[in-house]
Image (cartoon, grey):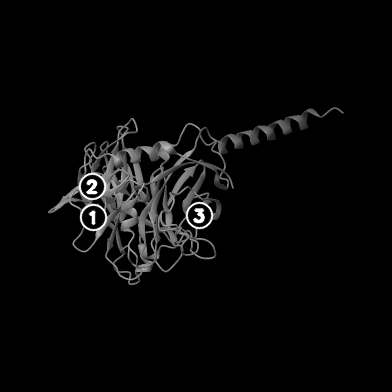
């Protein structure tokens, strides 16, 4: 059948109009993959990084540098070096096996017979080749001290760090390190009472500490279990740095996750911080609402990590702890199409390897999973670290176990592949 010319012209015009609309909606550079559910689909042990920290930690060339630590975070510096950031850090000497008691483990010790030195934080510099080169600490009146100084009534644990302009638009760059300010506690608060989030500024390239600024003070919140410390995870995305935090009340198996955002270049400016209240961004930290709420099989550990996988945001956290004696063991995944959620999960549970427990009590714990996206490999596999510790029964110190086997207080590494979930 012959189609009338007038109708053909009309159809052609409509098709041309639709094509123009499509071109307006899909501009060059907007062809991003759609946000889809993600989880860990496969993993393998990453021995190269684990071996390098073992080599460096066991080297007795210096006895005032890193032999073990936890709170493993990292940031790539503009000159290609990597700054590794640790919370509690052991220094002193490593004794190889065997010892007079026949223990087959490398042990921490000191030349004076005292307990190996422990400082609340340190920085370890990795060269461009991937070799760990030196430890940055501070000094006290009696010797080695933390890089970020202790307070008269507390200490600082560093978490995430970013390289950003000294001021918005400035060509000069600095390192901003987020810090958790904590005070000694009793009872369930054996790891300290949360007080404030601070930001330290380090100069480049010499990594000199220039100053520390409080950005989110929680000391006025009466219930310590409701105080939120920010910085366990953070992601730079366009004009913003998104900073995640949690309330780690010791009586709960999991914590609530919270979110703040700061314009790039202004991490150290308290007035620039905005907090997600469930509907909008506003300047009052006390109005923040959880982006993941603890309970009913959900919630995050006291430390977790967040990365971007294409258009999808992925959060990795320790799973809900098992029964006493089983310690912390498994990592699980949440995903979202935006920084603030809604977050879906958990899913994709994995159990990374841990050292054998020399006591046979199954108290070796894995915790603090942290992504290091600057080390993503050519196959797109993410580098993830996790810390190792020994959790003694309530009231039993763990120092003897940790110092008796150096593997119990050093990070281990995995390669993760994220896929549909």
Residue 4 x/y as whole percent: 81, 29
Q: Mark 2 Cα within 10 Å, few/some/many (few <14, many 20+)?
A: many
N-terminal-most mark, 1 or 2? 2
Residue located at (51% from left, 65% from top): 295
Image position of 204 with respect to 71: above or below: above
| Secondary-structure class at tag 3 | loop
The answer to whether residue 265 shows anywhere in this view is no
Q: Quadrant of residue 270?
A: bottom left
- 157 or 68, which lies in front? 68
Q: Residue furthest right?
A: 1
Choose the circle earlier in sequence order: 3 or 1: 1
What residue does disc 2 label? Answer: 92
Q: Which residue is mark 3?
A: 341
Q: CA distance from mark 3 to mark 1?
A: 46 Å
Q: CA distance from mark 1 to mark 2?
A: 9 Å
Could you tell which of marks 2 and 3 lies nearer the N-terminus?
2
Q: Where's residue 17, x and y in %?
A: 64, 35
Mark identifier at residue 115: 1
Distance Cα–Cα, label 2 vs label 3: 45 Å
The spot of residue 52 in percent (x, y) is 35, 37
């Amino acid at each position: 059948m012959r189609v009338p010319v007038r109708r053909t012209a009309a159809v052609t015009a409509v098709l041309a109009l639709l094509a123009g609309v499509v071109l307006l909606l899909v501009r060059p550079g907007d062809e991003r993959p759609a946000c889809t559910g993600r989880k860990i689909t496969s993993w393998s042990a990453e021995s190269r990084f684990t071996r390098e920290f073992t080599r460096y930690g066991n080297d007795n060339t210096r006895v005032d540098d890193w032999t073990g630590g936890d709170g493993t975070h990292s940031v790539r510096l503009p000159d290609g070096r990597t700054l590794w950031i640790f919370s509690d850090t052991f220094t002193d000497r490593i004794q190889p096996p065997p010892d007079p008691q026949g223990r087959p483990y490398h042990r921490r010790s000191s030349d004076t017979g005292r307990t190996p030195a422990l400082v609340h934080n340190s920085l370890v510099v990795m060269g461009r080749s991937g070799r760990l080169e030196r430890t940055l600490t501070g000094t006290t009146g009696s010797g080695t001290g933390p890089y970020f100084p202790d307070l008269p009534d507390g200490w600082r644990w560093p978490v995430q760090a970013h390289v950003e302009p000294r001021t918005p638009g400035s060509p000069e760059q600095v390192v901003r390190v987020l810090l958790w300010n904590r005070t000694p506690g009793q009872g369930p608060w054996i790891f300290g009472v949360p007080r404030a989030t601070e930001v330290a500024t380090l100069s480049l390239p010499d990594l000199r500490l220039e100053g520390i600024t409080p950005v989110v003070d929680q000391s006025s919140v009466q219930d310590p279990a409701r105080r939120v410390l920010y910085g366990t995870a953070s992601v730079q995305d366009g004009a913003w740095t998104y900073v995640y935090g949690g309330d780690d009340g010791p009586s709960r198996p999991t914590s609530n996750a919270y979110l703040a955002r700061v314009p790039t270049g202004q991490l150290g400016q308290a007035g620039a911080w905005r907090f997600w209240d469930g509907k909008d961004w506003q300047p009052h930290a006390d109005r923040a609402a959880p982006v993941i709420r603890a309970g009913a099989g959900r919630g995050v550990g006291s430390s977790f990590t967040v990365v971007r996988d294409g258009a999808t945001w992925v959060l990795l956290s320790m799973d809900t702890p098992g029964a006493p004696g089983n310690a912390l063991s498994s990592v699980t995944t949440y995903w979202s199409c935006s920084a603030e959620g809604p977050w879906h999960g958990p899913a994709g549970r994995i159990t990374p390897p841990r050292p054998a427990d020399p006591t046979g009590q199954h108290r070796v714990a894995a915790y603090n999973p942290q992504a290091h996206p600057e080390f993503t490999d050519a196959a797109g596999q993410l580098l993830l670290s996790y810390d190792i510790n020994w959790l003694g029964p309530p009231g039993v110190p763990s120092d003897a176990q940790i110092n008796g086997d150096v593997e119990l207080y050093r990070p281990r590494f995995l390669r993760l592949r994220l896929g549909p979930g």
